[in-house]
Image: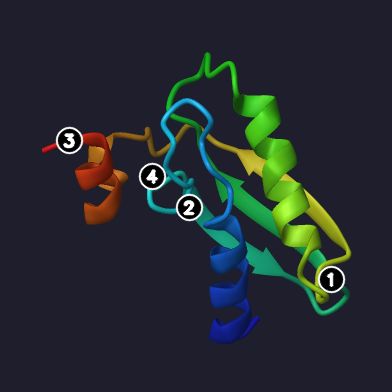
Amino acid sequence: MDQDMKDSMMGALETVIDPELGVDIVNLGLVYDVMVTEDGFAVVTMTLTSMGCPMGPQIVQMVKEALYELPEVEEVDVKIVWQPVWGKEHMSRYAKMALGVR
């Protein structure tokens, strides 16, 4: 997978807004990795802000919908992982400013 495709996938995922925090999942640092095979099978490795996140299923569905907008993507698998544990250090400067986090 080339860098342009990875950038396209991350750009699509920037449209996925965490419903509780109002910031996209990329800037929140929830997306750890993306890849797509030559035959269009995309895999997103990501986490959630907490194990009990009530919006988890909704966020996963939004991730799939965002990636299906890309013509190269035929199927999407979202892998939720808990290591590394998410924390504010994963957030972009933009997300920290938007949420008032130091």
Measured as percent of width and height from the top left, residue 62 is found at 69, 43
> Circle 3: is it few (<14), some (14-19), or many (20+) Cα within 10 Å?
few
The mark closer to the camera, 3 or 2, is 3
For the view shown, which residue lies furthest in the left direction? 102
Sequence-first tag of 1 and 2: 2
Which residue is depicted at the point 47% across and 25% down?
A: 20
Measured as percent of width and height from the top left, residue 28 is found at 38, 44
Tell me if label 3 and label 1 are in contact, CB under 8 Å.
Answer: no
**SS for callout 3:** loop
Residue annotated with mark 2 = 32
Distance, label 2 to label 4, CA atoms, is 11 Å
Measured as percent of width and height from the top left, residue 55 is found at 60, 23
The mark closer to the camera, 3 or 1, is 3
- Quarter assignment of residue 74: bottom right
Q: Label 3 is placed on what type of residue? A: Val
Q: Is residue 20 above or below residue 29?
A: above
User: With 65 as the anchor, is 95 left or right in this view?
Assistant: left
Distance, label 3 to label 1, CA atoms, is 37 Å
Numbered badge on residue 40: 1
Distance, label 1 to label 4, CA atoms, is 26 Å
Residue annotated with mark 4 = 28
Q: Label 1 is placed on what type of residue? A: Gly
Q: Label 2 is placed on what type of residue? A: Tyr
User: With 16 as the anchor, is 63 left or right in this view?
Assistant: right
Tell me if label 3 and label 2 are in contact, CB under 8 Å.
Answer: no
Which residue is depicted at the point 47% across and 47% down?
A: 24
> Circle 1: is it few (<14), some (14-19), or many (20+) Cα within 10 Å?
some
